[in-house]
Structures are given as C-alpha cells and as structure tokens.
Image: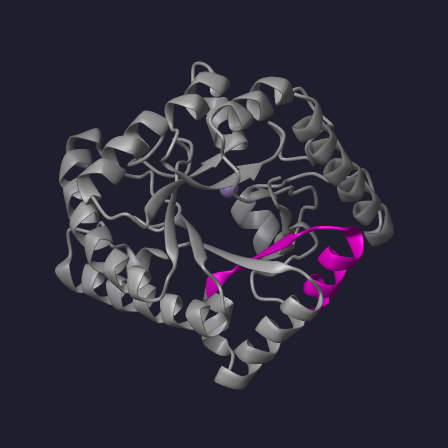
C-alpha cells in the first residue's frame, strides 16, 4: 500500500519552520510521510539534521523534501554563472538531504519557480540548458541514493514542463535512472485532457505524487475525479508515496507564493485543520482500498 503524507506548509505561513513540531503532528494524525521544504536544511547544523532524522524515525514518519528553485539558482538560465550557482546550490541541498537520511527531492528542480515571464521562442533553448544541468546534478543525487523528481506544473507557474508528456520527454533526454517525475493532481487538472490516461501513460516514470483538489483544499472535499486518479495509480502499480499538499490559509510567505487570497478554511482553527486532513487521509486510504 502506498505511504500517505502531508506537506508541512498546510499549517505554516513561512517556508522555514519548526519541522520537529510537524513530524510529531503528522505522526499523531496517522500520516506515514511528512514533506518539508528542502532549503531550510541549509540553515541547520549537521547535528540538527541528524536529530530531525532521528525524530522522524522514532515517530514512524518518512521525510520527503521539495523545493521550487529560486530565480538566482535557475539551472535552465541562459546565464552560465546563474546555472553554475544553481547546480552548486542543488548539490548542497542533496548533501543536506543525505545527512537527514532522505531519499527523495521533488519540485521545480529543472529551472526556477515561478518562471512564466518568457517567450515561447526561448523555450527549447532553456529546455536544453536544463537537460544538461539536470544531468549534472542527477549524478550527485545518485551518489547519495536520492531520487530526483521533476514536478510537472501548470503554465501559470512554469513554462518548461506543463504536461506529463513533456515531463516524460525531458526525463528520456536526461537519461538518468534516478530522475523521475513528480505528478500533482492540482496541476494536471489544468493541463491534461484526461488525468487518468496521463497517469497510466507515465508508468515507470513516476517517482513521487502530490494530491489536492482543484482549489487546493484537502482531497475528498471537491470535484477532482478521485476514482479515475486512484484507479490509474493502481492500474500502473505505482506503490510509491502519495503526499497531499493542501493550502487553505491566506497570509504570510506561503499564502503569497501559493496565491491564497481568501480563507478557504472559513475561519477554522488549527484543531479543525487537523480534523480536515485526518478526514482526507481516511478518504485517500479508503479510495486506494476500494477502486
Ligand atoms: Mn505539488
């Protein structure tokens, strides 16, 4: 059975937070996985990272890591020094994840986030820059035993990988066994003709999976075609992690960057937020059993 997780930023207004609190919370709510923002590890000492890894293990929670690279580290950039700094930054992240005993980094790891203010005319050149950069960092990821998962996201956030088909072409061009795709139902809902078909077409390419409703509420509260989605996941035998990534609270860095401009939780407090994702967790586990 797939391990089910949650992204810490559901509860947070800042991208860098007290992950220990969320390890305990995720464990207490019944999750198998906690996903955290990777760059926060760079502010932690070696011992702090080891303590976090230990805490996760003691609480029966696996840690996964994600990031949308900042523009100063855009590894698809035409500027060679930006690409070089980006590659060094990603290598530092990978080393930090290794120290924290992680085995997965996902997100916008092929360029930067967001990146949409570009002409289509430049797309192939940026794509080629990116393939070369990802090849370089994927070797480091491989040395550390880390799967490098490229998140396919919608056109309002990135120009390079908007569809599963583009993602697979990119992965084929990189040609590294530990470079996979991170699919996310929120993005697929915008870009794919048929979500179930896109998932089944990506058999063997999927390294990680994000789920959420069309408005990023917890799974099971909206009109996403969950039977189709979980049916496809089971049909291709994807047994990897599935991490829900709900965002419902406006405010702070997280609300700004995710574009949450109203309270989708209708004034709920933290305890009620916990209850909502416990329901979502039960919904996901039930669907995976039933479809
Ligand atoms: Mn996502």
| Residue at the spot 61% in from the left edge and 48% down from the top edge | 255
Answer with the quarter of the image where residue 138 lies.
bottom left
For this view, does 120 lie left or right of residue 63? left
Answer whether residue 32 is magenta in the image: yes
Query: For the N terminus, which image quadrant?
Result: top right
| Residue at the spot 55% in from the left edge and 27% down from the top edge | 234
Q: Is the magenta stretch mostly helix, strand or loop?
A: helix
**Region of the chain picked out in magenta, as a range:** 19-38
Q: What is the x, y in percent for residue 115? A: 34, 43
Q: What is the x, y in percent for residue 202? A: 38, 28
For this view, does 32 lie left or right of residue 114? right
Q: What is the x, y in percent for residue 210? A: 54, 39
Res. 2 in view: yes
Answer whether residue 35 is magenta in the image: yes
| Residue at the spot 72% in from the left edge and 67% down from the top edge | 21
Res. 191 in view: no
Answer with the quarter of the image where residue 191 lies.
top left
For this view, does 190 lie left or right of residue 94? right
Answer with the quarter of the image where residue 230 lies.
top right
| Residue at the spot 80% in from the left edge and 49% down from the top edge | 274
For this view, does 166 lie left or right of residue 43? left
């Amino acid at each position: 059975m797939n391990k089910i997780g949650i992204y810490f930023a559901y509860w947070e207004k800042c991208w860098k937070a007290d992950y220990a609190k969320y390890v305990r919370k995720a464990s207490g709510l019944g999750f198998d996985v906690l996903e955290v923002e990777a760059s926060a590890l760079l502010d932690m000492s070696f011992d702090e990272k080891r303590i976090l890894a230990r805490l996760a293990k003691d609480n029966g929670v696996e840690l996964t890591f994600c990031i949308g690279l900042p523009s100063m580290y855009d590894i698809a950039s035409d500027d060679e020094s930006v690409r070089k700094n980006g590659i060094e930054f990603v290598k530092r992240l990978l080393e930090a994840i290794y120290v924290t005993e992680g085995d997965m980094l996902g997100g916008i790891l092929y360029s930067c986030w967001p990146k949409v203010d570009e002409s289509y005319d430049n797309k192939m050149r940026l794509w080629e820059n990116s393939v070369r950069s990802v090849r370089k960092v994927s070797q480091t990821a491989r040395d550390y035993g880390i799967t490098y998962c490229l998140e396919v996201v919608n056109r309002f956030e990135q120009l390079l990988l908007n569809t599963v088909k583009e993602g697979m072409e990119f992965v084929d061009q990189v040609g590294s066994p530990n470079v996979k795709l991170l699919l996310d139902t929120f993005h697929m809902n915008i870009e794919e003709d048929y979500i179930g078909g896109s998932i089944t077409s990506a058999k063997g390419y999927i390294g990680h999976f994000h789920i959420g409703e069309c408005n990023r509420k917890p799974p099971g509260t909206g009109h996403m075609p969950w039977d189709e989605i979980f049916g496809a996941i089971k049909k291709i035998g994807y047994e990897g992690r599935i991490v829900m990534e709900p965002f419902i609270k406006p405010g702070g860095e997280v609300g700004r960057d995710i574009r949450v401009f109203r309270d989708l939780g209708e004034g709920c407090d933290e305890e009620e937020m916990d209850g909502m994702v416990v329901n979502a967790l039960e919904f996901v586990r039930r669907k995976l059993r039933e479809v």
